[in-house]
Image (spheres, grey):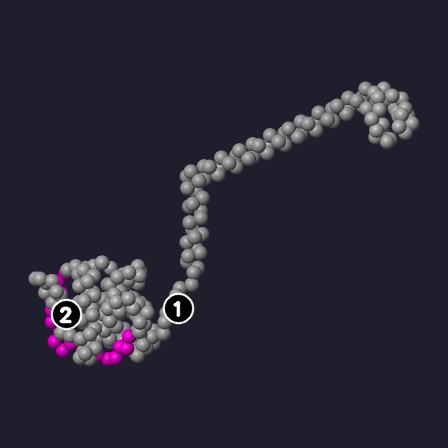
Amino acid sequence: MFCPKCGKEIKDGSKFCKHCGSKIKPKTPEAAQTHVSTQTSNDDRNKKIIIGVLIAAIVILAVVFVGFGTGLFNKQSQPAAQTNQAQQPAQTPKAVSLNSFPVSEAPALAQAVKNSGGNFPVTFQSLSLSKSQCMYILSKSISQIASGHPDATISVGDPSYAPHPSGRDSSQTIARENYVDMSNRFSTWIESNGAIPNYVGIFTGGVPDISPSRMLDICVSILIDYGNTHNLPASVKV
């Protein structure tokens, strides 16, 4: 036992503290019982707290395992990722002019031509572009992209349209090397002659030449695909 005054240990049943001389009052049975009951109550409460914490931890772990097992957390995080992606600012279009048309804007022009439904001129940013100008920009852009110059600019000019367009607009699939060659020859002809050629030849046996209008459709399809993938397609079906 300990002295209630100085706190030093003394023998059980001592009437006086041998250290400070204080009189030791004996504990009554009721006080001893109260002390034991209080200690027991505290121990029970601590056990209940520990058991409650363990149960809560088990429940949380079970929810986490079930969530990952069923993909619940992945489904909840997906809309947030899509929201963040949707909030990303779109790329600012580059300024265009007839003297300097960026090749990087050709996919957007191709989409504008498609949306026009074949009606010309096509309004694109500050420009009003004729059918022949769109043909030259798009075919020249394909040639520049294929040669590794996607950041080049084009001096458009004002080429005239073919006086007697010819060619057969049959359905066919054109491989990348062929449509790049066609685009290069088509745009080079325009640069040399200031006009759209009457037809475009395909270096494939038994395949008929195509009209300038079908060449425009081919360029539109290629550049819309390029705008979505940033790669020229392996082939184009027209």
Residue name at image x 33 percent, y 75 percent: 96
Q: Is residue 99 magenta?
A: no
Name the spot of residue 174 as percent of width and height, x first: 17, 61
Q: Residues within 10 Å of mark 1 (few under 14, many from 20)?
A: few
Give the distance between the C-alpha atoms of the residues marked 2 and 1, in whole angstroms.
35 Å
Residue name at image x 18 percent, y 67 percent: 181
Which residue type does callout 2 highlight?
Answer: Val
Name the spot of residue 41 as percent of width and height, x first: 70, 27
- Write the start and end of the magenta stretch as one range: 154-171
Instruction: Confirm whether residue 138 shows in the render.
Output: no
Residue in front for this viewpoint, 80 or 102: 102
Magenta region, main secondary structure? loop
Q: How many marks?
A: 2
The answer to whether 81 appears left or right of 107 in the picture is right
The quadrant of the image that shows the N terminus is top right
- Quickly name the residue at label 1: 92
Instruction: Confirm whether residue 167 shows in the render.
Output: yes
Q: Residue furthest left?
A: 206
Q: Secondary structure at mark 1?
A: loop
Which residue type does callout 1 highlight?
Answer: Thr
Quarter of the figure with residue 228: bottom left
- Residue 200, label in figure: 2
